[in-house]
Image (tube, rainbow, N blue to C red):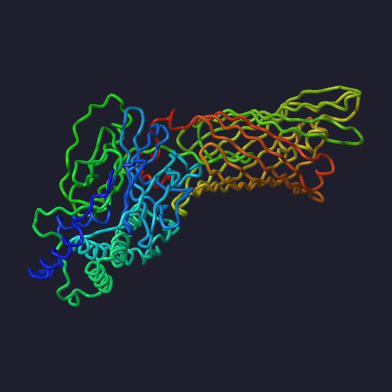
Amino acid sequence: MSLVRAQGVRGALLGTFIVLWTGTEASAAPLTDKELALVEARVAPHVVNERKLSLERGGTVFIKASMRVPEKRLKGGPGDYIGLVTNVRAPNDIVVHVETDSWKFEKKGNDFEVEITYVVHASPTISKGGEVWASLKLLDRLGIGNEVKSEKIRLAISIVEPKPTVYQLAADFRGYRHFQALAKERRNKLAPRGVTLSLKDLDPPPQLVRASDQVIAEVQEFGRWRKRMWSAERHLQAASRSTDRATAALAKRYLALLDAKDDALGDLPLALTETKEAPVTSGVTQLGDGSSSKDPKSTKPRTGPGEIEELQPLETTVLPDEPEPSSRRDDPNADTKPPTETAPKKEEAVVEDVLTLMKKREVHIPRYTRGLILDDPNVGFSFATRMGWANAQVRGETSLSPAWFFSAQAGLTDDLGVELTVPLSFVRLDLTREPSLIYMGNPQVAAKYRFFLPEIAGRRATIVPRVRWGIPLQGQQTVPPTLLQARDFTVEPHFADLYAFLLEKHAIGGGASAAWDYSMLHIAAQLYLDAYIPTPSSDDPLSFLVISYGLSVGVRPIEYAGAFLEARGTGLLAGPGRHEVFTYFGVKGYLFDHIEPAIWVSLPLGSVGDVTGFQLGAELRFTYDIDGVIRYGKGRQSDRLQFLD
């Protein structure tokens, strides 16, 4: 692909003469639909992703790239996802924008084709091109395991000298003023809502605390307008450095009046075409097949069955097709109909209609990230086995004292679930005597109910109250040839799970856990109060209260793995009291949507550290989302903000 050259210096001078002779007819008025299309083609030229591109000095190109994503990976609406460009390596004067311009979803069999448009521009002072490497990522905007799909970008960009016509410079001037006015209006509209937006080029978007879907859509639209505004300004900056004096002088004149009032423009050339049919070239084409790039706005949008259309900027008079209802997405046998063009609507009407449709669409109940040890904030179906490898030294006897915890949970409704945990311990004294004992601890049953707090930074934190009961089914177990009981070797190294091996005592209590995900960050906490009540046959008649708590902080930079730092504390509220804390550091994987392996190291603090030391732990969990079992229930037709993923 080669750059479509403009008419040259002679054409520019001739065009200037014609415009000055015929007058501008006060063309500083708002752009018509046809004029807006011409301005868009100039300041936001779109091309299909290719290996080689030719770019004007000061030019900007909007590159369309596509990636295939399995349907099961896209459980939310378009507003739940965002495209970003990361890991950029490029020459100093070639800039790859981190925030992408737009993205849309189109159903393709059992997959979705996600088309993301990212932006690259060349500095007005650039002298030569070079190669660009980057990663284009589709991210779950609200989830922690936020990378849905990633594609590598590699571009070879050559730089050519711009030779704009007077009409192109006029399009840059009027485009800058048009998009600046839209951006300022949107900025002023959002300011009273606590959203601060910057007109500076490449400034990152704000952190959207408690932002609604509409606010998020409006901020994204603001970013699109800002990209076009500065694309136009860079064209003028590059033209002002032209070796052609007439072109440079006219560009400098435009730059000087960018922010002037309409009545100060005088006889400034503002017409966009010599005739109504005169074309305006974009200044960017693709290399390789020799064909010029076409304005994507001049063709019908690609649509298909089940398409979920991302809210598009006001780029053309042809608006994207309305997204299809989720029933088509869920039904593979749904009939397909040819796409139809929708009638042009006002921008605010489009925003309102799309958001209304997204709220009515059936949504799934999302899963929160689960860390290493703390309770699961999700309601679903799972089975897990957890092992803690530990040693203990009690009254001069050294024992190997690992423990296994077998747990299962089931969802009764979307928000109500039950859990069962069965502990098992192995006790073996030092190798010279080699006696061993395997015994079951106290099973624990629990019921939990999940509800959500108001939005915090675009995601609702979840609160999960629980009631639980550790049931004493076994009597004391003596470890031969000693007179010590098995619990003497297991309670200390597994003190954070006190209910499990404190035999002959009921552990009845309740409390709550909470979880919140922000981007790749996961934060969870829990707090419980349990009453330990002896059985009638117990040799220990003491009853007491125990408080236990936990805190987890994790980061999950990729979908398949995360690292977590956790702590669990247990305190006895009886006698002189006792307080023990166990710290955990480890990694956890999230594989095939259902498998969660984890490994960690643990270090106990407090008096337990005198009995047991450095420990190792591992878990293997199989999960099944409630969405796959309970098809309908509370909240499934509710505003999707209740269940932001």
Q: Is 196 left or right of 292, judged from the image as shown?
A: right
Give the image location of residue 446, x and y in percent. Answer: 59, 35
Q: Is residue 248 above or below residue 421?
A: below
Viewer-proximal residue among 434 and 345: 345
Pick the front one: 216 or 9: 9
User: Up-down: is 620 above or below 604?
Assistant: above
Q: Residue at x 40, y 38 (%)?
A: 634
Residue 364 in picture, x, y percent from top left:
40, 37
Residue 545 lies in what quarter of the image? top right
Residue at 38% in and 58% down: 127
Quadrant location, the C terminus: top left
Residue at the (16%, 49%) spot, across then down: 344
Query: On the rendered structure, is 308 left or right of 418?
Result: left
> Disc count in the image?
0
Specify whether 273 is left or right of 248.
left
Quarter of the N terminus within the rendering: top left
The percent position of residue 451, horizontal first and vertical second, equals: 48, 45
Tell me residue 72's x, y (percent). Answer: 41, 32
